[in-house]
Image: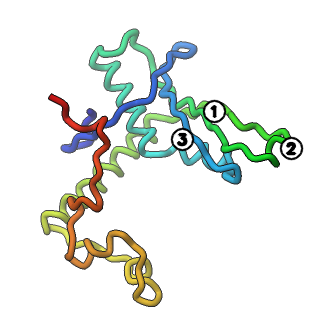
């Protein structure tokens, strides 16, 4: 668990590596053969999920849970492309490893964004802030929206319904 303003974010890291005097979160991702890896890698570098993991490691160090005290450098991203015959014929890398450093300013900015989004969702749920509809996306060009959240915007459903909440067993509280 980690604090995000007055909220708590819960997550489980894949692995933590200690490399050249710094901690790195290790993340494994599989992508389709046609995904441009350089674009995917940069998206992962600034991904909120990865930034939360970064801060979780920093907090564990600060609280003495992880020893020795060392800086957190970022994420080691293992990217595995789903192989195709064409890739093998053209000697395209199927597996690649990328080091994704990030700054404290990027992490702080991420947490400010997350806190704002959580505050907005909470305000929408308790009725102190109305839900803003994106008229183009919500209604659809021909009033045939495919947005799964349309029923929430229309007041027919809530974000707490089974349709939107599906806890994985690893996050369930076990006695």
Residue at 57% in and 14% down: 20
Quick one: SS at disc 3? Answer: helix
Instruction: Using a 10 Å C-alpha cutoff, classify the residue at mark 1 as few (fewer than 14 neighbours), some (14 to 19) or many (20 or more).
Output: some
Left or right of 102, for residue 151:
left
Residue at the spot of label 3: 45
Instruction: Using a 10 Å C-alpha cutoff, classify the residue at mark 3 as few (fewer than 14 neighbours), some (14 to 19) or many (20 or more).
Output: many
| Mark whose residue sits in front, 2 or 3 | 2
Quarter of the image holding residue 152? bottom left
Q: In which quadrant will I find the N terminus?
A: top left
Quick one: SS at disc 2? Answer: loop
Quick one: SS at disc 1? Answer: strand
Residue at the spot of label 1: 98
The answer to whether 32 is drawn above or below residue 10 in the figure is below
Left or right of 6, for residue 81:
right
Residue at 42% in and 42% down: 49
Quarter of the image holding residue 93? top right
Residue at the spot of label 2: 90
């Amino acid at each position: 668990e980690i604090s995000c303003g007055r909220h708590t974010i819960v997550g489980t890291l894949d692995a933590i590596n200690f490399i050249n005097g710094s901690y790195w979160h290790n993340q494994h991702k599989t992508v389709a053969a046609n995904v441009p890896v350089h674009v995917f890698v940069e998206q992962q570098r600034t991904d909120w999920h990865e930034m939360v993991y970064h801060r979780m490691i920093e907090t564990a160090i600060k609280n003495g849970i992880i020893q020795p005290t060392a800086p957190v450098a970022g994420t080691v991203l293992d990217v595995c492309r789903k192989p195709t015959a064409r890739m093998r014929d053209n000697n395209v890398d199927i597996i690649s490893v990328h080091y994704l450093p990030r700054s404290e300013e990027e992490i702080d900015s991420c947490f400010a964004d997350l806190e704002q989004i959580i505050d907005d969702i909470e305000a929408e749920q308790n009725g102190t802030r109305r839900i803003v509809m994106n008229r183009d996306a919500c209604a659809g060009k021909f009033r045939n929206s495919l947005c799964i959240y349309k029923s929430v915007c229309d007041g027919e459903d809530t974000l707490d319904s089974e349709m939107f909440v599906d806890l994985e067993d690893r996050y369930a509280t076990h006695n």
